[in-house]
Amino acid sequence: MPPAKKRPRAYDHLRTRTAVLAQYAHVRDAVAALTPQQLARPTRLGDWTVRDLVAHIALGLGSVSRDLALPEPPGPKPATTLLEWPPAVAAVVRDPGASAPAADHPDLLALYGEVEAAFLADVPASGTGDRLLPTRVGSMRLTDYLVTRTVELVVHTDDLNEALGLEIPYDRQALAACTRLLADTLADRAPGGSVEVRVPPFAVVQCIGGPKHTRGTPPNVVETSPLTWIRLATGRTEWARALEEAEVSASGERADLAALLPLLR
């Protein structure tokens, strides 16, 4: 009999909205200080420059207002749940064939201001976040879609930091939501209870079929930091490299996640 599915994690609408705005503000403030030379630098995302990446981040948040402007899909249930989003769209892993987004947005600071103003006007601080959005992977609850924006923002903040040698900060709640969604995605993709994956202080999940652990120290444990986990889950770093550089610890014969990563291809 296959392992029973666990109840999906719930996210608070107001806290998630606040986290999205906070992380976006961190990026916006960093962008305001970038020089033309920095904007022209390459990134680890194929042929995109920093300017392209910066524009993509703003447009990613702008998709919330864009989708809210469309008619609400018939309900009451969304077509795509939060755990179905990662396999449905590699939103944080750029399509190599996509056009450079900066070409149509030469004034980046104006773009950031417009996107933020629209978000504040369109996404209320009150309410349950149950409104359905017609996203490109099917209708989603507003709050769930905001959780996916934390993934976009956190992952691309890391991309910017790597490209420029900066230390753009991570909002704690945004980092937590991103970490938890990617950890829950692993548990959903490889259900079971033989391996415990720990990403302190934000997430602990059990995955992979086999003998289930119930008491004491688990025989198969993987532990790493939030940023390392996010890089593993999105293909920014490889499992073997993270092990070699002691960025992740893995004990037990089943504690090998190489075949399951990255989660977002």
Image (cartoon, rainbow, N blue to C red):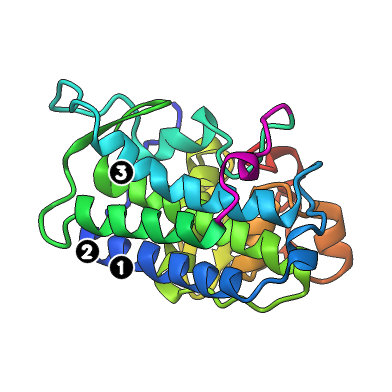
Magenta stretch: includes residue 1 = no
Quadrant in which residue 250 is drawn: bottom right
- Main SS, magenta residues: loop
Q: Mark 3 is on which residue type?
A: Ser
Q: Which mark is residue 18?
A: 1
- The reply to whether residue 183 is in sight is no
For the residue labelled by badge 2, is the local secondary structure a helix, a strand or a loop? helix
SS assignment at label 1? helix
Question: Hey, what amino acid is under mark 1?
Answer: Thr
* Tag 3 near tag 1, CB within 8 Å: no
- Indicate whether residue 104 is drawn in magenta: yes
- Residue at the spot 60% in from the left edge and 57% down from the top edge: 155
- Tell me which segment is drawn in magenta: 97-107
Comparing 55 with 168, the one in front is 55
Left or right: where 112 falls relative to 256: left
Task: Give the labeled residue for mark 3.
Answer: 65
| Above/below status of 8 relative to 133 | below
Point out the image quarter for the C terminus. Answer: top right
Q: Which mark is residue 14?
A: 2
